[in-house]
Each structure stands twice: as structure tokens, then as C-alpha cells.
Image: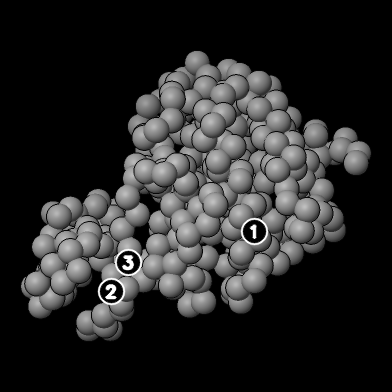
Amino acid sequence: MPLNSKIIKQRNKIIKENNFKLLKIFDTNEHEDYKDVVLIYDPKDKKKKVLRVGEHRTKNFLHNGYKGKYLIVPKIYSIITAEHNKYEIEEFVKGELLVNCLSKPTADKPIDDRYLELLIKSFWEFQTIGKKINLPKQEVLTSKVKKHLAYAYKVMDGNKKQRAENLFKNKKVINFFKNSNYPCKWKFAVDNLILTTDSKIGFIDLARVGKRFWGYDLGWIFWPLWFHFPIQEYKKTKEHLNWLENLFKKIDEYKPKNVKKVDIIFYGYLIILERVIGTMFDVAANISHAQKITKKKRKMKAFIKFLNELLELTLDKIKNYKK
């Protein structure tokens, strides 16, 4: 049963008043009661559309949609205000959730190469178009990283705590996380990207698109998959870090000439660091998506060991990094 019946009643009223047909209810409201996402059919133009509340598109972000070489951003048909809530009617992107197209993830190959190449190309296409849009800046360092560190310490090995804390006092590292000049699609992650029928990446879940530190969204490519590794893969930390290093080398190879040069490999280590700490937070705080791990004692123990080993390897890489 949905947690917020008022949201559901408003949605049903909008459907009835506009003569829409309800086709599918997504599980969004079950996890976050202030949100609701459904698929509808509009008889006026005979199109499937998405009706959503609680996940509002950033003001300046491509409300008319975008169809590029590698990515698609759905357009917003209209916005309906009902009892202080904004319901967006959005274009339906036909395709399959990318996560459903992937092979079983392993430490040394979390994502099939063909999809990884497409993700990298769509990332750079978004960087190219995103820098032309007046997007809001999203501060990360003081609000998120520090909050996550406090929780992460609960599952972090003691000998790493001081090293991690000292790193976030380093001027070069502080400047990286405070440099919020790069366009970022909130949650550029395999579990909320669509592989379209013409093999492009469709952006959905477009709340809080904005500018953050470089590559923030790249971390969301590999982070969700950590929770889905088979337990034996948590022993292969070095192999996984090697894959991550090669990932950032590939990202560098595909960089368009008109995009400002960044130190991608060093930035990659900082992104891995931020995601490891974020994941430790998820486990320590036992947030909903982490419960697939925390409910299984043996897997949780293996996962925490994997995260601590990955953290140590990453801290060493940052310490010894020479451009």
C-alpha cells in the first residue's frame, strides 16, 4: 500500500480529468512517499507518457528535450499544479533499463564493453551540451562528504580513518570537490538510464541536474554494481581497481577536443574515493538499497572488507600519484 495516499489521490484525479489511461505504476512511491511515477496513455495524441511528481526537472534543463548522437533527454509536455504539487507530464523513452541488459557483473568486468563505450560517449556528449546551459551549482564537500565520513568511520578500518580525514584537508583535494563547474546529470547510473531501441542512452530521473565536481556522475556508473557483485568477487579488489583505472583511461581516450583538459586519472582516484566513502555511509546508515547487503551477514562482512581494501589501494594511489 502506498505510503502517501494524498499523492496517489491527486494523481488519479489528474488521470480522470484528462481522460488518461493508467498503464503502469512504478515502485517509486513505495520507497519515497513524496514521489510518484506512472506510465499513462494520452488519447488526444495517442502517445504513452510519464506522469511524475516529486522529481522535478531543473528549471533550465532541456524542457523541450534533446535527441543527439548518443543520448536522448525526454521533453516535458506540460506541468500541472495540484494542491501545491507539480505533476510533470514527460515524454516516454522507449527502451529497456540499461541494468537489465547487462551481463552478471564481475570485479574485473562490471559492465559489458559495448555498453561501457556507449556510456562514455554519452557522458562526453552531455558535457558538451551541458556547458551551454545555465545550470545551478550543487555544493558537495561540506554537506555530503563530511556527513558521509562521519558514518563511514563506523565500518572503516581504524588505520585508514586518519588518512582519509587528512586527505579531505588537502588543498588540492578540497579544490577538486569545491570546483562545481562541470555539468552533471543527477544519478548518471546504469539502473536509471534507458537503452533505447536505436541503441542510445535515454536520460530519466532528471531531478537536481546541475554543476558539481568533474565526473561526479561517472562514479554512479560503477557504484550501483558493487551491491550486485557475487560474494566471491569481493575478494578481487586489485582486479577491480585495475578495471576502474582502465575505465578512466578510456574516458580520457574518448574526450572531445573541444572539452577543457582535466587530469582524468588523478580525478578518477578522487571519484573512487568519494564513492567508497559514500558506500560505507550507505552500509553504516543501513539505507534502503544497502539492505540487500546488510541483511546477509556473510555478504556484508565480505563487502565491508572489499570497501576497506579498495579504500586503502586508492589512498595509496593518491599519495604516490605523479602526473
Q: Residues within 10 Å of mark 3 (few under 14, many from 20)?
A: many
Q: Which residue is mark 1?
A: 127
**Residue type at mark 1?**
Gln
Mark 1 or mark 3, which is nearer the start of the sequence?
A: 3
Q: Earlier in the sequence, mark 1 or mark 2?
A: 2
Do labels 2 and 3 touch, CB within 8 Å? no
**Residue 128: % across, % down:** 66, 61
The residues bearing labels 3 and 1 have C-alpha atoms spaced at a distance of 23 Å
- Apparent side of residue 50 relative to residue 226 in the rendered image (left or right): left
Local secondary structure at mark 3: strand
Disc number for residue 77: none
Residue 2 at x, y percent in the picture: 17, 58
- Which tag is nearer the camera, tag 2 or tag 3? 3
Of residues 191 and 294, the one drawn nearer to the viewer in this rendering? 191
Secondary structure type for disc 1? helix
Say which quarter of the image contains residue 142.
bottom right
Give the residue type that dot 2 points to. Tyr
Query: Where residue 95 appears, x then y in whole percent?
Result: 34, 45
Which residue corresponds to mark 2? 87
Q: Residue at x 78, y 53 (%)?
A: 257
Q: Which residue is at a point 48% across and 59% down the rendered structure image?
A: 67
Mark 1 vs 2: CB contact within 8 A: no
Q: Which mark is residue 90?
A: 3
Return the x and y of residue 187 as percentages of the image width and height. Answer: 50, 53
Tell me: 24 left or right of 16.
Answer: right
Q: Amino acid at mark 3?
A: Glu
**Quadrant placement of the N terminus:** bottom left
Q: Kindly indicate the quadrant of the structure image that contains residue 212.
A: bottom right
Q: Is there any visible trace of residue 139 in the rendered image? A: no
